Amino acid sequence: MVLSGKLPISVLNVLLGGSPRDSQDLIVIAKFHSHTGRLTIALSFVQGYRGSVVYFRGVWYSGALMLAVITGGSRGIGESYARQLAARGYNLYLVARDAARLSAVAREIRATHRVLVEEIVLDLAQVDGAERLYAEVRSRRTVPVDVLVNNAGFGFHGEFADMPMPRIQDMLYLHLVTVTKSMRLFLPEMRERRSGTIINVASVAGFLPLPYISLYAATKAFMISLGASIGREAQAYGVIVQTCCPGQTVTDFHATAGFAEPRYAVGGVQTADEVVSDSLAALDHPREPLVTGLRNRLLVQLLRILPRGLVLRTAARHLKPS
Ligand SMILES: NC(=O)c1ccc[n+]([C@@H]2O[C@H](COP(=O)([O-])OP(=O)(O)OC[C@H]3O[C@@H](n4cnc5c(N)ncnc54)[C@H](OP(=O)(O)O)[C@@H]3O)[C@@H](O)[C@H]2O)c1
């Protein structure tokens, strides 16, 4: 953007820490806004002086330099992370399998927030899903990854004995192998830079064994445990690892999981935007794990004190497919 105008020399003195000497002087003002990740640079030639006012003409640039990688960024909670991080000035790499959907979301975010949004079409439910993601990000990026959101995931509703073997394998790869390996791949650079954030989207379901969504609950329990211990190690280097545990959230999740209808009876129901707002707000005051929504937090506290047998019986009754 072209920049031209006039400024009192006294203001320029404050901005530059010294005043320009003659009409050929170059004014350079650079400011990095660490909260939003925006870099503002003004480059301008002094055109002349009149009294205590300096006239200048040059260019002005303000853009995001921070980069967030979001898995499952094409829908639901991941899409909300994408929109809210873009609104904070982050460039985005969005990962999902459905290329058309990913591209539509990326186009829309680019137009709305004027940040760079790149699509990575990748099935992360593979044994080397994390390595492929890491290699793809490294081959494209020009700045370090500041935020990694391990959000891609899916549920399965039904008896474990009926769960198709390919779904079991996909869930284990996506929720356990890819999340674990991605942290291992992206963390060392963050540790070296002494800054960075990893958000793993687990679930309130990870706080208890849940019949009829048994493997899903167990994988989310793994994420909660791993995130808490790695988060503690990373804290020493100024790196944040947040395990975000939403309760029931209005997305395509329940349809994909095979629920005949969403079971929105227990805990609070949130929108994806509310979950993500809670998650990002909590980065300033880290809590491990982060349970989003007041009603979900109360539910988790209640689960800690109720007898395990009672919780299992009630959950089984509530979740049994009709
Ligand atoms: N909704 C809830 O009630 C709820 C509650 C607690 C926790 N969560 C967790 O929140 C996370 C996001 O779920 P959501 O509710 O937003 O569900 P969603 O609307 O179904 O979105 C899932 C996202 O993950 C992507 N994804 C799924 N499998 C993938 C794979 N193999 N490789 C790459 N990307 C894949 C999907 O894109 P493609 O299909 O195009 O690949 C999509 O972008 C999940 O981890 C889920 O367990 C959800």
Image (cartoon, rainbow, N blue to C red):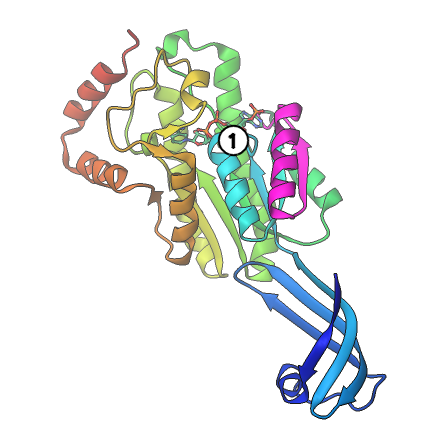
Q: Is mark 1 within 8 Å of ligand 1?
A: yes
Q: Which residue is mark 1?
A: 152
Residue extending farthest right = 24
Q: Residue at x 74, y 61 (%)?
A: 1
Quarter of the rendering occupied by the C terminus: top left
Front in this rendered view, residue 4 or 44: 4
Does the stretch in magenta take in 171?
no
Q: Horizontally, is 8 left or right of 160 in the view?
A: right
Q: Position of residue 147 (x, y in %)?
A: 55, 49
Front in this rendered view, residue 153 or 66: 66
In terms of image quadrants, where is residue 293? top left
Q: Residue at x 49, y 23 (%)?
A: 171
- Amino acid type, residue under disc 1 in the picture: Ala
Q: Position of residue 162 (x, y in %)?
A: 40, 7
Q: Secondary structure at mark 1?
A: loop
Q: Is residue 128 visible?
A: no
**Is residue 198 positioned above or below 62 on the image?**
above
Task: Specify few, some or many for label 1: CA neighbours under 10 Å numbering under 14, 14-19, or 20 or more.
Answer: many
Q: Is residue 37 visible?
A: yes
**Is residue 21 positioned above or below 84 on the image?**
below
In terms of image quadrants, where is residue 110? top right
Q: Position of residue 43 (x, y in %)?
A: 76, 71
Residue extending farthest front = 50
Q: Residue at x 38, y 8 (%)?
A: 161
Front in this rendered view, residue 313 or 254: 254
Q: Horizontally, is 59 left or right of 37 in the view?
A: right
The stretch of residues the image draws in magenta is 98-125
Q: Position of residue 294 (x, y in %)?
A: 26, 42
Exactly how many numbered labels are in the figure?
A: 1
